[in-house]
Amino acid sequence: MKRGRLTILAVSLFLSLALIVHTLLAEGGWKRRDNVRQALTAARGENAILRAKAAGLRAEIDALRSRPEVQESAVRRELGYIRPDEVIVEVPTGDTPAP
């Protein structure tokens, strides 16, 4: 039993050393490793941003499903709906020519 563990340890050590030597001596090995690490860091940053956006969208969906005032606000904003007793007054801006 002890011999089997020793063999596994020796093989693991050999493979580890082989990978280290390959990384250090192979053409572009260390530079490629740095490039992969930078890409991984960038991907993790993008994932964090996307997770935050997804959490915000989930919160908005929950609010739209459960809060009538949020539903009304979304309908007014997105579809331009008004209540029957409301009056809309449009004020022209400098970009819009007056009729």
Image (cartoon, rainbow, N blue to C red):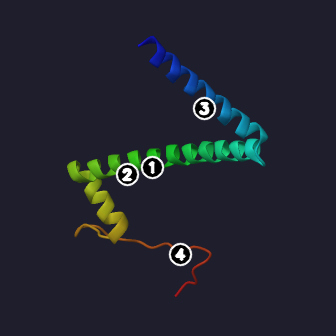
State the mark number for residue 15. Answer: 3
Residue at 37% in and 64% down: 77
Question: Please, what secondary structure does the residue beneath circle 2 have?
Answer: helix
Residue 87 falls left or right of residue 36 = left
Q: Quadrant of residue 34?
A: top right
Please report whichever mark, 4 or 3, sits nearer to the chain's N-terminal start.
3
Using the numbered discs, state the Cα–Cα distance from disc 1 to disc 2 in whole angstroms: 6 Å
User: Callout 4, which amino acid?
Assistant: Pro
Which part of the image, by quadrant, shows the N terminus? top left
Mark 2 lies on residue: 57
Is tag 2's residue or tag 3's residue first in the polypeptide sequence? Answer: 3
Q: Are marks 4 and 3 in contact (CB under 8 Å)?
A: no
Secondary structure under the numbered disc 3 in the rendered image: helix
Looking at the rendered structure, the kind of residue marked 2 is Leu
In the rendered view, does 5 fall on the left or right side of 31? left
User: In the depicted view, which residue is nearer to us: 23 or 63?
Assistant: 23
Q: Provide the residue designation for mark 1.
A: 53
Task: Tell me where residue 32 appears, x and y as whole percent.
Answer: 71, 47
Label 2: how many residues lie within 10 Å, few (<14), some (14-19) or many (20+)? few
Looking at the rendered image, the disc whose residue lies closer to the viewer, 2 or 3, is 3
- Gap in Å between the C-alphas at discs 2 and 3? 47 Å
Residue drawn at point x = 40 percent, y = 49 percent: 54
Residue visible at 57% across and 73% down in the picture: 93
Amino acid type of disc 1? Lys
Give the spatial CA distance, label 2 vs label 4. Answer: 33 Å
| Separation of residues labelled 1 and 3 (CA atoms) | 42 Å
Reading the chain from its start, which is encountered first: label 1 or label 3? 3
Pointer 4: what residue?
92
Q: Position of residue 95 (x, y in %)?
A: 61, 77
Element marked by disc 4: loop
